[in-house]
RNA sequence: GCCGGCAUAGCCAAGUGGUAAGGCAAGGGAUUGCAAAUCCUUCAUCCCCAGUUCAAAUCUGGGUGCCGGCUCCA
């Protein structure tokens, strides 16, 4: 296997991957805040996490994957007048915030299933981990990393000199009050809330820290990752917007509380653009899986569109681009179907000896995917194999190997599921229909022959007429 | 103002010093009753300017534009 390398935001460079514990990888993904339906932008981060996990697993690592669900609201500003988005949305919908998070979480999991994302091992919810968060806040107070003002607790940035090592922001360069009112309670503008108290809050807890309390935005990830993955773990991922302040603050909290390194490798996905610009509700371009379906696309089309690009590169979502991805996916499904239909032509297959051509393709694929998940380059090798096959440059003895390779590719990407709306036909039924069609064609009854072709097409069966007769295979969409 | 990142054909997107992968779309031809299938074929000097180098899309400097962060956000 080629070397596995990843870009580490912390090091600002691509570096070789080595797990803390041989053979095992523990990783944490910043998941959704469950107050609104996830959209295509969110999916990019989640699909990236899925691909990362699969690449690690295919290399034989035993992966423990954790993705949090933020189901508690955070005030928008540190100054107490801020509005809680989760509670605001709940009010808008006239439902209880608990009911809101339950519904959105359900939708989130349904979306993940549709996108064929492998379930993480744990999906911890913030509201289920109040004691863990309180314990960590108390620890930070004990260690002098935090201070209390009434029932509010703030992290003292001056007690963590490495603050800024992830984002490159230096405390002295942060413009206090640039976009947010200065909170007079804080000793330093860069200090951030660990725990807040507000009687007006709906989701609130009475704890050792005081009454009517609720967690600061960052503490849940520190507390929950520690619970499920330990004080130091391998990989932490999220969208690029999480680098600062969220992940920077997590590092400060976790390392401040334990005195140990928090995470070895930080990976961040770049924001998805829509129509060349940012995605925003006001622009009406915040798309969900429902919008994708309404345009006649499969969730797997979106999956392929997102995963075929590099996670750190900008990706521009347009309907035209999605259509292009859907066509490309279709052609690979077709390739798979054609290979499957070759079963009776395969001769000279040696299960112990890789076909050199397919082995070389596989090597190119693996080199690319192991190099910081270069999916575009990896998938190019799959298309090249397809072209080779269609040009007759692949021997029948190699077909089986091509199928093995495609299965490996699909184990990582999962987009080769053709799917069709029509009925399932057995091979015998297909043959019978093709005989009927051949007769109709002889009699120049093209209306009937085209009807049969359409019938087969709806069942995902592609037919090709040639001077030497009609061939068919499954794999159409 | 400060901190990151990106800029490759109509569209999507690889490539980080040696002369532009791959996909989609489009044009021409073949095949076909027709074709949505398939084959052959055509289609970029890499945002701009200036440097370094025998050689730059790839390095340096300066612009311009876009994205993210300094507020919740994947």
Image (cartoon, coloured by chain):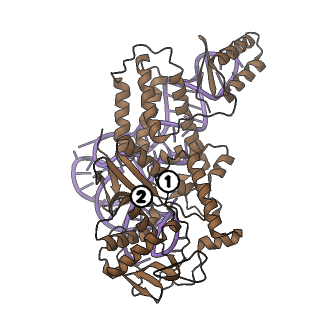
User: What separation in Å lies between label 1 and label 2 (alpha carbons)?
Assistant: 11 Å
Chain letter of the brown region: A
Give above or below for A45 relative to A420: below
Q: Which mark is residue A59?
A: none
Circle 1 Cα neighbour tier, 10 Å, few/some/many (<14 / 14–19 / ≥20): many
Q: Chain of mark 1?
A: A
A19 vs A293, left or right, is left
Give above or below for A395 relative to A172: above
Foreground mark, 1 or 2, reads 2
At horizontal 46% and vertical 49% (from top left) the residue drawn is A50
A398 vs A41, left or right, is left
SS state under label 2: strand
The image position of residue A417, as x and y in percent, is 56, 35
Q: Nearer the viewer, residue B23 or A303?
A: A303
Marks 1 and 2 on same chain: yes
Chain letter of the purple region: B
Question: Which comes before the other along the chain, label 1 or label 2?
Answer: 2
Residue position marked by numbered label 2 in the rendering: A28
SS state under label 1: helix
Give above or below for A402 relative to A156: above
Q: Nearer the viewer, residue B59 or A412?
A: A412
Q: Is residue A352 visible?
A: yes
The image position of residue A441, as x and y in percent, is 73, 13
Residue position marked by numbered label 1 in the rendering: A46
């Amino acid at each position: 296997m080629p070397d596995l390398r990843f870009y580490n935001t912390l090091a600002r460079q691509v570096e070789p991957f080595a797990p803390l514990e041989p053979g095992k990888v523990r990783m944490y993904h910043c998941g959704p805040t469950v107050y609104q339906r996830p959209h295509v932008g969110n999916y990019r981060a989640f699909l990236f996490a899925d691909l990362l996990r699969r690449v690690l697993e295919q290399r034989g690592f035993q992966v423990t994957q954790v993705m949090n669900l933020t189901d508690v609201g955070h005030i928008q500003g540190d100054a107490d007048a801020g509005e809680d988005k989760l509670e605001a949305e709940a009010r808008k919908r006239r439902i209880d915030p608990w009911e809101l998070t339950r519904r959105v979480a359900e939708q989130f999991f349904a979306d993940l299933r549709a996108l064929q994302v492998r379930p993480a091992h744990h999906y911890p919810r913030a509201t289920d981990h109040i004691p863990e968060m309180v314990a960590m806040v108390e620890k930070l107070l004990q260690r002098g990393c935090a201070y209390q003002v009434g029932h509010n607790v703030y992290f003292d940035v001056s007690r963590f000199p490495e603050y800024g090592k992830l984002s490159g922001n230096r405390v002295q360069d942060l413009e206090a009050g640039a976009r947010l009112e200065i909170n007079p309670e804080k000793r330093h503008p860069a200090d951030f809330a660990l725990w807040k108290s507000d009687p007006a809050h709906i989701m609130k807890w009475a704890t050792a820290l005081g009454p009517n309390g609720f967690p600061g935005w960052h503490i849940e990830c520190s507390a929950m990752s520690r619970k499920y993955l330990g004080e130091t773990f391998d990989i932490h991922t999220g969208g690029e917007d999480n680098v600062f302040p969220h992940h920077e603050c997590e590092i400060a909290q976790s390392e401040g509380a334990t005195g140990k390194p928090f995470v070895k490798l930080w990976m961040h996905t770049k924001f998805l653009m829509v129509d060349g610009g940012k995605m925003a509700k006001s622009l009406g371009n915040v798309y969900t899986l429902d919008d994708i379906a309404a345009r006649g696309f499969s969730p797997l089309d979106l999956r392929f569109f997102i995963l075929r690009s590099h996670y750190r590169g900008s990706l521009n979502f347009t309907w035209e681009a999605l259509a292009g991805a859907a066509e490309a996916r279709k052609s690979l499904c077709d390739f798979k179907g054609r290979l499957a239909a070759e079963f009776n032509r395969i001769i000279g297959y040696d299960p112990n000896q890789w076909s050199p051509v397919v082995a070389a393709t596989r090597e190119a694929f693996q080199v690319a995917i192991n190099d910081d998940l270069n999916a575009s380059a990896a998938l190019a090798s799959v298309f090249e194999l397809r072209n080779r096959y269609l040009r007759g440059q692949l021997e029948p003895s190699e077909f089986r190997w091509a199928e093995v390779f495609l299965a490996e590719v699909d184990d990582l990407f999962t987009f080769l599921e053709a799917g069709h709306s029509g009925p399932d036909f057995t091979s015998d039924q297909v043959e019978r229909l093709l005989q009927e069609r051949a007769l109709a064609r002889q009699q120049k009854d093209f209306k009937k022959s085209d009807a049969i072709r359409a019938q087969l097409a709806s069942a995902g069966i592609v037919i090709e007429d040639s001077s030497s007769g009609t061939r068919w295979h499954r794999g159409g969409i």
